[in-house]
Image (cartoon, coloured by chain):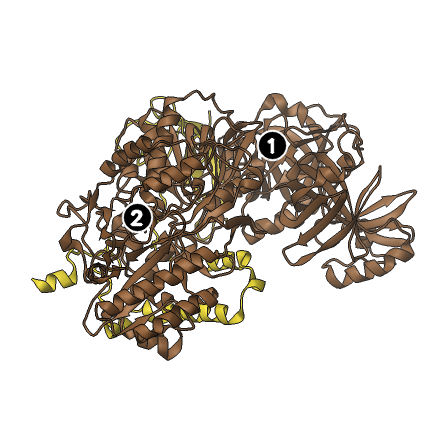
């Protein structure tokens, strides 16, 4: 394994070694780092240098400097999270974060501030046991690696000089104010030796084409990749889906490689001794929530540094876009000047044209007129140190949802900051201002400034706000009841799981945070390396494609495995299924609540590829099948039968015999005996006692044309359960029980049980138990929402909704339950109207009173009503009971997610 | 042993023998009057020295009325089953009959990932996926129509007007300083306004 970057995009030669991912991946490593930004890149590189094997997972793609073409239309979708469309849930604040290898450090303005002493003290008072000298040492180390230097006088562009002059002019009660040049991380380009420092192009937000901005990509990541002695890999286009763990030990990460639209391409399973979450504020909280780690504290205490701006319009050309965008700051009103609560920095910044057009709060002709002043304008932002009042929740689809409202303190700070900056621009010759408030987008004189401040205070919703520094959500501190991680960034309740990024900040930092994040990562990495005492991870293949679990493989992969796998001749006798045709728990059917796997020897359950093309999906939902084998009189062969799960129209008898076939070796030839099936045949290979891979052919044996690949198994996860499996669990007193209200309290996600396929998530159940009463809300397909009445008896946990159907639930494990949404047991009269309703909606009609052969094959005469055994789409079913009658409905599986 | 035997060696791009890959011999039936269903003739694993041997009989390829001699090609698969190389021998190659043994060298081990994609090509997919996720997380009931409309209007206007180079001159925006396809077009790293100063 060479040090390399891996990803799903094939975009030609890049600066670093890059390989295209072409199949599922399983890695066993010491450390798995999720995220490659200011924290993740530092942690991964330092731990690799400490001799650990490291895998770094990154949601975004890898783009080298030469790919960065300085065009917003091209680069924002490539480098920015959510293609730049990243908002709070009320759409009031646009949040800029990077989503690419190197994270936000690739798209930031390279501003470096050390953590203010005041903040170190405040955090210590909040339970963060990191000493001032620890921060200093870490800052020194990082500053050396990423080449932090002060901006020089001649590097200030016109925009920054205007702010500098404005600060020099401004007096507060007669006294000068605090302001100075920024420090930045820019230095020698490693791809163009003629460039020893910032080129000053002004396109920091779109990635540095010249590799002079010392982002994680060109420092920590590049350094690690360049050292062949390290065991270090970065997997891009890789979404971390969940952290797996048992008791208090994390075992690894399941992830998915995605394409540009977010569709699954491949999967990855990383087994790791240590897992570190560094996905950034918001995403880190979201991952912990999806993994059910950290409890109610996760997502709380989010801060954003929300920032309005003010532009000054001048008679002279400014060309603010030329040069370093952020090089000068007024510190007078901020934490760097000892302001303990709230406060703000005024920072020079200038946006490229598309972002500027978004920021100006007007429309139509007014907007156009303001944009015509682009080259004559200055711009600065008021970066407020807000209170951590925001929350990260999880949406129906599992996306992070940021709920954030401005506090009165922050609104006041914004009003003051806008007022001060407005005065500053006028003081250095601005003829008018462009404000961030939609009620007053243009300000023509100093006399209007009070009205502008009033507008901000009276209607803060009218402000255009941006945030580039989300922080908090996984608070660090020494109180395990209110915090998510301790001062070592270790997650409470875990031995080997860490969160290390801006999400652990207990308060807003008050200054641009990248240096502090890198410093924290440095401190944490050193601690982890020094105290290394982690036991090996259990090797698991997760849900990746593997010969032991071909149900997780794509069709093509099954074919590839078939080509090179040898059939286990010794296992042929075990092809036979149970002679008992009825499901008998403990005999031919078992369930393991620990692994959530079903052993079913009634038949071999068939699986198609996991591909998401229309044909394979159609096969999965409507073409599900099973095969059953019995020893025949003729030793050396077996009688088989193939059935689909959906309409029982196919009953294909077969004979299974081992044969030699050139190119394939020994295979089981499944010869279909009766027309029309006799024009086809299958070749099977037994992989192990419970796993078969196969190919279906059309034509004569050995010369047929391949139709599709498939697999079969007698052991499968509960997600793949059939309705029969669910009923077995449902009706077994040993394997399931009626839950109490308390047991069900929480949030559950559900999927409909289909005999053929694993269906996607279709419902959410919310159970809230309070003061002796349970309240249940549901959301079905994110379209139907409502409440159900709950009734609990010794034998039944029942939910009644406004339809003729009701739910019956039984609990299997504390985190898994099964349910049926069914009509009441009923006679034909009561069912008839419901069946009539279904006829309107279902593609396969439920018929009555017909005598066609098709009907005779597919319908069952139940109390005078001829009903198909399965009708409609593949997860509707009919249940019958001699004593109770008939009912229709669907089955589902629910899993706790919160 | 069949009537025909093919022996060969699999090497990588550096000429080093490749162990533990499986070589499949196939007969191509893609000709005009053939059944377009290639015949799998046989397969064999390479050993530590990279060599393999595959035997097959004429019955494996001569089933069609119009099929004549074998039209041989090879596919090499790694231990995961992934096809990593395909080799077609010279047009005049014929496998030996009983005593005829031919050595075949299968060349490059490099898996073909296909032609490279344009990195910017799928940005519309990214943008649409992003907007879909906004729909998932936005609290629509919390938003007033005027704000949402203004945001959409401004976004659309900014995209349509200000991402186009012809609008930049009008507002005296310098624009990008490198080509749109920097990897394809030679360029220097000098800024236009710095160059003009000189």
Q: Circle 1 — which element?
A: strand
**Residue A277 rendering spot, x and y as whole percentages:** 45, 37
Residue at 28% x, 61% y is A350
Front one among B122 and A871: B122
Can you name the residue that lies furthest to the front here?
A173
Q: Earlier in the sequence, mark 1 or mark 2?
A: 2
Residue A619 in the image: above or below residue B20: below
Label of residue A588 in the image: none
Q: Quadrant of residue A852?
A: bottom right
Q: Quadrant of the N terminus of chain A?
A: top left
Can you name the residue that lies furthest to the left here?
B198
A572 lies left or right of A864: left
| Callout 2: chain | A
Residue B101, can we see it?
A: no
**Residue A451 rendering spot, x and y as whole percentages:** 39, 72
B134 lies left or right of A830: left
| Callout 1: chain | A
Front one among A780 and A178: A178
**Residue A188 rendering spot, x and y as whole percentages:** 18, 43
A824 lies left or right of B59: right
| Chain displayed in brown | A
Same chain under badges 1 and 2? The reply is yes
Q: Quadrant of the C terminus of chain A?
A: top right
Residue A671, can we see it?
A: yes
**Residue A666 rendering spot, x and y as whole percentages:** 56, 27
């Amino acid at each position: 394994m060479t040090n390399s970057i891996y990803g799903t995009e094939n975009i030609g030669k890049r600066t670093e070694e890059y390989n295209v991912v072409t199949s599922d991946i399983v890695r066993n490593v010491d450390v798995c780092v999720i995220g490659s930004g200011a924290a993740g890149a530092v942690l991964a590189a330092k731990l690799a240098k400490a001799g650990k094997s490291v895998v770094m997972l990154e949601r975004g793609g890898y783009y080298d400097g030469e790919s960065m073409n300085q065009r917003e239309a091209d680069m924002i979708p490539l480098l920015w999270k959510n293609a730049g469309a990243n908002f709070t849930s009320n759409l009031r604040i646009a949040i800029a974060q990077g989503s690419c290898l190197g994270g936000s450090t690739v798209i930031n303005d390279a501003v470096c501030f050390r953590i203010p002493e005041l903040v170190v003290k405040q955090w210590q008072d909040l339970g963060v046991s990191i000493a001032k000298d620890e921060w200093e040492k870490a800052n020194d180390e990082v500053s050396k690696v990423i080449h932090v230097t002060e901006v020089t006088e001649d590097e200030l562009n016109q925009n920054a000089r205007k702010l500098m002059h404005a600060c020099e002019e401004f007096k507060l009660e007669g006294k000068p104010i605090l302001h100075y040049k920024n420090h930045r991380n820019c230095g020698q380009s490693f791809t163009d030796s003629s460039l020893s420092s910032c080129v000053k192009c002004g396109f920091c937000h779109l990635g540095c084409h010249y590799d002079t901005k010392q982002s994680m990509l060109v420092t920590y990541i590049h350094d690690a990749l360049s050292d062949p002695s390290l065991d270090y890999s970065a997997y891009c286009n890789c979404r971390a889906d969940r952290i797996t763990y048992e008791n208090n030990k994390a075992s690894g990460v399941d992830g998915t490689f995605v394409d540009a639209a977010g569709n699954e391409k491949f999967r990855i399973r990383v087994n790791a001794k240590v897992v570190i979450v560094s996905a950034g504020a918001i995403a880190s909280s979201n991952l912990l929530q999806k993994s059910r780690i950290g409890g109610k504290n996760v997502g709380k205490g989010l801060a954003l540094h929300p920032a309005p701006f003010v532009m000054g319009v001048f008679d002279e050309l400014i060309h603010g876009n030329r040069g370093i965008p952020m090089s000068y700051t007024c510190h007078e009103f901020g934490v760097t000047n000892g302001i303990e609560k709230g406060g703000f920095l005024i920072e020079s910044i200038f946006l490229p044209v598309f972002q500027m057009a978004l920021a100006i709060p007007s429309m139509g002709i007014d907007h156009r007129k303001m944009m015509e002043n682009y080259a004559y304008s200055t711009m600065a932002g008021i970066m407020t140190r807000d209170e951590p009042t925001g929350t990260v929740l999880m949406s129906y689809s599992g996306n992070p949802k940021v709920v954030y409202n401005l506090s009165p303190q922050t609104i006041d700070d914004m009003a003051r900051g806008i007022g001060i900056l407005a005065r500053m621009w006028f003081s250095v010759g601005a003829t008018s201002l462009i404000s961030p408030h939609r009620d007053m987008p243009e300000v023509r004189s100093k006399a209007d400034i009070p009205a502008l401040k009033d507008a901000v205070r009276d209607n803060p919703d009218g402000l255009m706000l941006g945030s580039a520094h989300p922080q908090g959500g996984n608070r660090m501190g020494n109180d395990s009841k209110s915090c998510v991680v301790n001062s070592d960034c270790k997650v409470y309740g875990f031995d080997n799981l860490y969160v290390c990024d801006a999400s652990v900040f207990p308060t807003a930092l008050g200054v641009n945070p990248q240096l502090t994040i890198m410093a924290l990562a440095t401190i944490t990495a050193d601690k982890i390396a020094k105290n290394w005492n982690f036991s090996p991870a259990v090797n698991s293949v997760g849900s990746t494609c593997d010969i032991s679990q071909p149900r997780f493989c794509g069709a093509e992969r099954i074919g590839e495995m078939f080509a090179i796998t040898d059939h286990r001749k010794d296992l042929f006798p075990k092809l036979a299924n149970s002679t008992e045709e009825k499901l008998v728990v403990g005999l031919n059917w078992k369930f393991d609540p620990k692994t959530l796997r079903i052993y079913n020897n009634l038949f071999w359950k068939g699986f198609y590829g996991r591909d998401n093309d229309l044909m394979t999906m159609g096969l999965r939902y409507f073409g599900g099948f099973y095969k059953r084998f019995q020893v025949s009189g003729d030793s050396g062969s077996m009688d088989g039968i193939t059935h689909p799960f959906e309409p029982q129209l196919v009953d294909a008898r077969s004979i299974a015999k081992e044969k030699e076939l050139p190119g394939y070796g020994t295979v089981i030839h499944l010869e279909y005996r009766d027309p029309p099936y006799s024009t086809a045949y299958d070749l099977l290979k037994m992989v192990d006692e419970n796993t078969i891979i196969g190919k279906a052919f059309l034509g004569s044996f050995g010369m047929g044309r391949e139709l599709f690949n498939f697999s079969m198994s007698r052991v499968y996860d509960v997600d793949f359960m059939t309705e029969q499996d669910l009923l077995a669990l449902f009706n077994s007193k040993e394997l399931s029980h009626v839950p109490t209200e308390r047991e069900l309290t929480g949030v559950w996600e559900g999927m409909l049980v289909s005999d053929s396929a694993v269906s996607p998530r279709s419902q959410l159940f919310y159970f809230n138990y309070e003061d002796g009463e349970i309240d249940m809300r549901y959301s079905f397909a994110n379209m139907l929402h409502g409440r159900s009445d709950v009734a609990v008896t010794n034998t039944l946990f029942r939910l009644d909704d406004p339809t003729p159907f009701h739910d019956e639930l039984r609990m299997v494990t504390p985190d898994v339950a099964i349910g049926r949404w069914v009509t009441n047991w009923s006679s034909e009269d009561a069912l008839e109207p419901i069946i009539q309703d279904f006829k309107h909606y279902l593609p396969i009609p439920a018929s009555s009173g017909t005598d066609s052969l098709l009907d005779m094959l597919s319908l069952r005469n139940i109390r005078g009503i001829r009903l198909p055994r399965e009708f409609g789409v593949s997860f509707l079913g009919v249940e019958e009971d001699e004593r109770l009658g008939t009912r229709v409905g669907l089955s589902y599986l629910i899993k706790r997610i919160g | 042993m069949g009537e025909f035997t093919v022996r060969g060696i699999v090497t990588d791009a550096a000429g080093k023998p490749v162990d533990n890959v499986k070589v499949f011999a196939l007969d191509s039936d893609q000709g005009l009057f053939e059944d377009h269903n290639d015949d799998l003739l046989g397969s064999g694993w390479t050993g530590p020295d990279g060599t393999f041997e595959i035997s097959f009989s004429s019955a494996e390829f001569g089933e069609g009325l119009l099929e004549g001699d074998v039209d041989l090609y090879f596919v090499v698969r790694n231990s995961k089953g992934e096809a990593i190389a395909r080799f077609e021998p010279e047009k005049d190659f014929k496998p030996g009959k009983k005593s005829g043994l031919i050595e075949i060298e299968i060349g490059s081990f490099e898996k073909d990932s296909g032609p490279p994609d344009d990195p910017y090509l799928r940005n519309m997919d990214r943008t649409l996926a992003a907007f879909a996720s906004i729909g998932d997380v936005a609290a629509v009931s919390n938003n007033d129509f005027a704000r949402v409309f203004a945001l959409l209007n401004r976004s659309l206007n900014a995209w349509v007007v200000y991402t186009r180079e012809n609008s930049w001159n009008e507002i005296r925006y310098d624009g990008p300083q490198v080509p749109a396809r920097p990897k394809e077009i030679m360029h220097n790293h000098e800024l236009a306004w710095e160059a003009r100063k000189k």
